[in-house]
Image: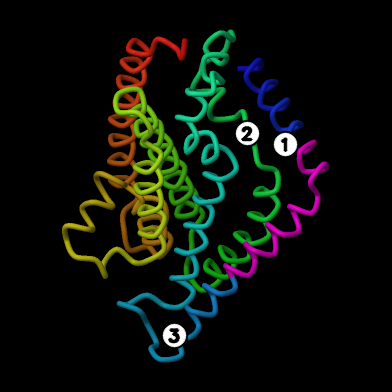
Amino acid sequence: MKRHLRIIKIYFRDGISTLAAYRFNLILSGMANLLWVLGQVYYLNFIFEKVNTFDGWSKTDVILLFGLMQCFVYLMFIFTWESFANFYTKITSGEFDAMLLKPLNSKFMLTFQTISVTQIITGVLTVGPLIGIGLSGIQGITFLGLISAFLLFVIAISMMYFISLLLVSITFFIGDSSSLFELVIGTGAEGVKLPQTIFPTIVQALFTFLIPVAFIAYYPTLILKNIENPLPLILFALLLATIFYFLQKIFWNLGLKRYSGIA
């Protein structure tokens, strides 16, 4: 464990070095992200000028959903998006072969080798206020509710990570699967920021069982609002996370057995 933490620290230092070399990127990325978030908030304000609630959800409730969605998106961009979306390129360029020769878990290296410090900074500056505004509008939040909602969020992020690895593993069998990865994760991100009750039943099932993004924002918000009992949700999320963990492990190991390198 200590060894892996040291490696992550090295990758983080590399990210800081990259940021120092391209400081202007931080300004551009920060401005772009800030403008996008402000645009989304303006859009929500426009909607709630016309209606008091959106399918029973107040403006601050929806802002909380949006903030949690942004947190998920930033975590993806900080750690995995670049490596996972470009996995096929890493294979064809021989970079993945070099990973396999190193005395570290290849999935670990693929996950943490590119840490975007720029996204960490812009994420904190945009996500923090959104979640703060969202929480301020919920009455009667309990400490147990906060802990339960946070735990469910962490489990949900783990599920989406396992699903991402599963999608990346498909590259071993069909070639470039980056479009499928971007489609599934992008669709999931869009599904997080809206109340699930506005979707048809089949879409709600999709966002609960196959692309379980409902556990990232929707169900944690219901827990914070004291609408849902957290224990069944946490147990069910743990069950799904276990299933996706073993699925990605099986597909990854089968893929490695099929993989013979670029030579």
Boundaries of the magenta span: 16-37
Tag 3 residue: 48
Tag 2 residue: 114
Magenta segment's dominant SS is: helix
Specify the amino acid type for callout 1. Gly
Q: How crowded is mark 3: few (under 14 residues within 10 Å), some or many (20 or more)?
A: some
Specify the amino acid type for callout 2. Thr
237 vs 242: above or below: below
Q: In which quarter of the image is residue 56?
A: bottom left
Is 34 a magenta residue? yes
Q: Residues within 10 Å of mark 1 (few under 14, many from 20)?
A: some
Look at 35% across and 28% down and name the residue there: 175
Residue 147 position within the rendered picture, expressed as x and y whole percent measured from the top left: 49, 48
Is 88 a magenta residue? no
Q: Distance between the residues labelled 3 and 2?
A: 39 Å
Front residue of 38/1: it is: 38
Tag 1 residue: 15
157 vs 90: above or below: below
In terms of sequence position, does the residue under pointer 3 or pointer 2 come before the other? 3
User: Decide: marks 2, 1 in contact (CB < 8 A)?
Assistant: yes
User: Decide: marks 3, 2 in contact (CB < 8 A)?
Assistant: no
In terms of sequence position, does the residue under pointer 3 or pointer 1 come before the other? 1
Front residue of 112/131: it is: 112
